[in-house]
Amino acid sequence: MPGEPPPIEIRGLTKRFRRVLAVDDLSFSVERGRITGFVGPNGAGKTTTLRALLGLVTPTDGEALVFGRPYQELAEPIRQVGTVLETSTFHPGRSGRNHLRTVATAAGIQRARVEELLELVGLTAAAKRRVGGYSLGMRQRLGLAAALLGDPQVLVLDEPANGLDPEGIRWLRNFLRRLADEGRTILVSSHVLAELAQTVDDVAIIARGRLVAHAPVETLTARAGGRTRVRSPQAEALREALAADGIEGAPLDDGALAVSAPPERVGELAAANGIVLHELRTESSSLEEIFLQLTGGDAAVPR
Amino acid sequence: MRLLAAEVLKLRTTWGFWVYLAMLLVLTALVVVGTIGSGVGAFDEESWRDLLQAPLIGFAFPLLVGSVVVTSEFRHGTIGQSLLVTPRRPLLLAAKLAVAGLVGLVFAVLSFALMLAIALPWLGAKDVDVGLGDPIVRETALVVTVAFVLLGMLGVGVGGALRNQAGAAVGLLVWFLVAEFLVRALLGVIELDGVARYLPLAAMEALIGSDDLEDVLSQSAGGLVLAGWVAVAAAAATGSLRRDVT
């Protein structure tokens, strides 16, 4: 539909806490049906931005809108937006099931839906136990279950990967991918870009309260220069072949070469010169590098 | 309505509520046993009144439960989740005031019923002639209920205004057990005794028909003044809850 407001829109958002400017004239919007990674160092203003979006924090200036309206004005907020907040939102003495029931009751959601979600996030067996005894991973899954109670089209997740072990992160990635495949719009924050790089479609990078980049992942990867990692038993011959074509190859610690050309080009040159390759791939750390470059690798400072 | 149901569920599923209720009932029972058991002399009109007012020994519990209804959410961060479901904060506060009033009602009914359940058979066995038909029974039941309901709501107001669990609980207890007496004494010194009867505890004492204080308000005026304090605290809570939740 033309003119339909985007699921999430941040417009000129500014938030000042006493002497700290947490968010500084931030603007970006999230497109329908995409996973957007909201990335920045700790203290960059991610949580404040998300809390402003959810009506928990009042902006000093600007606005943060869901479907074109402030969160407080949504008729059935948790049926439209599902949220996992960064800080714990559980009473440690309450069981996981009862936590979901309190949310469901307040929102007028059927009890059967609670059981459905416990099943979906794999907490059915632990549902009776007090949340105080849950592991971090279980808490994150309980948070996701609460976020999905109202079957919302938009999900806002603040650092859902925080404290998860590698297996937990993999579970989360698959889970988010599945939710996105159902057509949901997801805004997910993290201070580690690598956690999200394989999962998100777009990345919005924030540093010191300001937006420093907002683009599809591929665009950012391309911008990183397409550094290629190549390993060959004939490393010297390969270097010469590359140099003959004006491509520089820098030797890495393990004998591989870091090459500033796309893998296709490197592979073609190797074939043309009859050089055996044992490894050829795009360096995955390149995203992380551009992230550090863009954010200056530091957090917000009082000013 | 569903907000109210959710608030009731939140209370039911935490142990704090049950501990406070149990303590109220134990204290009430102790007072009943003390009043009847220690009666060396005749069981007179005054003993009967003391007995009926036994639940008031636990007047702090509706206050504390009321404050915890709000402060527990801030303590454990559940306030974030609650506001995501109910972003209109005055609405959430209203639900909490209502549920605390309900807690006051339940506390009053249960403790009053427990008092009667112990006292009536016991007094009957001692051949003391008392009965449920006595108008003072109905009057006291009403007064205890009104007091507990208002105290529960006052707890919500103070809890909402302070947001801090320990701060609100300590603040309420210190005021009702110590500070108000000091303030009354101070008011006496500067010859403003007339003001003292409008303080919260004084208003509650007037409401229950206590004659400890000189120059007390009438029972209904005491109830109204206490309701006024509830309104003041609720207004302070509304202001405080408008602040950022971080």
Image (tube, rainbow, N blue to C red):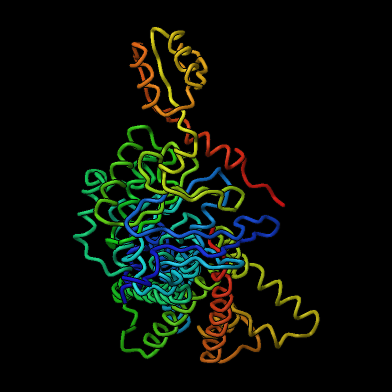
Judge whether A252 appears above or below A106 on screen: above
Q: Residue furthest right?
A: B190
Q: Nearer the viewer, residue A25 or A122?
A: A25
Expressed as whole percent of the image width and height from the top left, the position of residue A265 reads 39, 25
- Where, quadrant-wise, is the C terminus of chain B in this rendering? bottom right
Residue A98 lies in quadrant: bottom left
In the figure, B201 relative to A98: above or below?
Answer: below
Residue B152 appears at what percent x and percent y? 46, 73
Residue B123 as seen in the image, left or right of residue A51: left
Rendered location of residue B37, percent (x, y): 41, 67
- Residue at 28%, 45% in the rendered image: A175
Q: Residue at x 54, y 75 (%)?
A: B238
Residue at position x 34%, y 14% from top? A278
- Residue at 42% x, 75% y: name it: A73
Rendering coords of residue B49 (x, y %): 45, 81
* Tally of numbered tags: 0
Q: Is residue A254 visible?
A: no
Question: On the picture, is A99 further left or further right than B75?
Answer: left
Front in this rendered view, residue A274 or B108:
A274
Q: Quadrant of the N terminus of chain B?
A: bottom left
Task: Return the residue nearer the eye: B66 or A248.
Answer: A248
**Image quadrant of residue A24?**
bottom right
Viewer-closest of B211 and A259: A259
Residue B69 visible in the picture: yes
